Amino acid sequence: MPSPEEILLQYWGYSRFRPLQREIIQSVLEGHDTLALLPTGGGKSVCFQVPALCIGKLCLVVSPLIALMSDQVENLRKRGIAAGMLSSAMSPQDLPVVLSNAMAGHYQFLYVSPERLVNEHFRNAMMEMDIGLVAVDESHCISQWGYDFRPAYLNIAEIRPLLPSNTPLIALTATATPEVCDDIRQKLQFRKGQTFSKSFARKELSYVVRETEDKLRTLLRILDKIQGSAVVYVRNRKKTREVALWLEQQGVSATSYHAGLDAPTRSLRQQLWIENQKRVIVSTNAFGMGIDKPDVRVVVHLDIPDNPEAYFQEAGRAGRDEQKAWAVLLYDEGDLQDTEKRFQQQFPGIDTIKAVYNWVGNFLQVPVNAGEGISYPFDVAAFAKRYNQSPITCLQAIRFLEQEGLLTYSADQSMQSRAFIPIDKEKLYEYEMLHPSMELLVKTLLRSYGGMFQDYVVIRETELAERCLLSYDQVCQKLERLNKDGVVNYRPALKVPLMHFLAPRQHPDLLSISVKRYDERKNAARERLEAMLAYARNLNICRTLMLLRYFGEQKAKACGHCDICVSARQSEPLGFIEQYLRKKPSTLDEVMAAFRGPRPQFELAIRELADQGLIEERAEQLWHWKGE
């Protein structure tokens, strides 16, 4: 078995691990079920990818988002590591290719959605796989006390008896309260379990909250003051476009990003921002998963998030290079009032939820007792218009139906274009001879993307167009022709969201929604929202301290550099004088003019610091800081 350090160097090019990664990996290698809590940017994926490669068997990875799975699979393949994925967005015809590769031992990692685990065909295939490790990403989704509960996660423990008894499981998350951690360990049936938690403290990240009547002007001042790459989070798609356009008009390079954009546009805008061709990306919370840009200097929220977990994750995308960064929340009094309205919208009545479920079945023309395991294109705007409902009400009702395990809705549209060659090389050559107009594209596909005879690989039509000297539309048309001829299985990027039925459609009279679970979720969401509002309204407690205590770090200390700590230091004379004179030698009149407190306190502090030899007056009546 190679050592973790050898694996890290071979595939990632690093000679040492980040704090706590080595201990987590060792726990897994010793056969312990392991819970790893690492803040955003803490390197969670390495904690299961490295031990899986050490073990040398297949690692089954349970992940909740198509976008996240797709990104990680592509990143592993770029490192020369074989990986595949099974998602609800794949057609039934594509599944045998991935399953046969997994059973034949051609993969080192297989990513699956939690919904896949209940499928009997998959479970039978899984028992033919040589699985050495199970990794559960975003494991907070298993807890009904968490902010993103998904009932499909409860199925994970059911697969454990199907695996060798010594198969370890690692659960990973970036945000979890102590109650959620207990739930994770219980629901996953931890055996010989160990928990590793890196402090949520981010010494390089300063939290700031500003109440302002003009958020855009305040945003502009922030971007003028803090140079470098920035993320601006807003609540809806329309606002992403409006804010990005306004910033461009003010001379700030910016682009917008949201789940409604088609895959090529999203990819292009994301890349422009990553490469610093666009300084600011204005986004909904659809942005961020799987994005590893270390040099983000500031994250600004123009709307109050629904809970501290979401805020902490999004704010944590700043300063991953461990250099100074800021997380700023801007709000006005209207935002505080809007939160209550938004909260009520998040919990439509049970009768409304039942009606939406029935309408979804009618809209998609799914018969009663049918639809299980099938994905349907779903336009939520058209759906809401047909049934004279607000899109927000519909989406929130659908979210609750997801939590009831009835269906799941994917709006991220992030499955990239893929292709697989189902015939052997000899038959492919014969096809090229009979169809010379297709030869250039086929050869370019083979030169550009390896492994197409074994599995689906991500392809980029724009890249092929450039190499073949064709237009984008011409490449797509030729790929469709190859698909029709059975030469290349071409799956273009998803352009519409999908509704996936986890269970057969139920008759409206038989549909049961638990009032108890509804009330529990509403009360838990209320508590999380109140915690977020308390953070925004807070004027006295260190902001880092508030967040750390929320996540269970009761012994944490004040950070010293959030807006609350800085304000307190400026009103405390000893600390203020030290901070001021450390920046530059100054006259006492200059220091006093900047000090906010009473003059007698200031004069007393000056005498005390001078008596201790920490400050001294030099030429031109300039006082210097001498302290260590």
Image: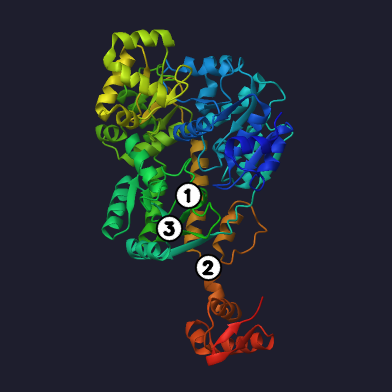
x then y, percent, for residue 394: 35, 36
x then y, percent, for residue 132: 66, 25
| Residue closest to the eye, 502 or 451 | 451
Q: Earlier in the sequence, mark 2 or mark 3?
A: 3
Could you tell me which residue is drawn at 51 percent across and 23 percent down? 116
| Left or right, residue 241 beside residue 403 | left
Asked which quadrant contains residue 505, the reply is top left
Could you tell me which residue is drawn at 42 percent across and 46 percent down? 274
The answer to whether one can see residue 32 in this image is no
Instruction: Report, in whole angstroms, how far the alpha carbon at label 1 lies from the one at label 3.
Output: 17 Å
The answer to whether one can see residue 35 in this image is yes
Residue occupied by mark 2: 564
Q: Earlier in the sequence, mark 2 or mark 1?
A: 1
| Tag of residue 274 | none
| Residue closest to the eye, 64 or 322 | 322
SS category of the residue bearing label 2? helix
Residue occupied by mark 3: 228
Asked which quadrant contains residue 89, the reply is top left
**In front: label 1 or label 3:** 3
**In front: label 2 or label 3:** 3
Disc 1 to disc 3: CB gap under 8 Å: no
| Tag of residue 314 | 1
Instruction: Report, in whole angstroms, how far the alpha carbon at label 2 lies from the one at label 1.
Output: 21 Å
Query: Neighbour class for label 3 at 10 Å: few (<14), some, many (≥20)?
Result: some
Amino acid at the residue labelled 3: Gly
Q: Is residue 233 above or below residue 43?
A: below
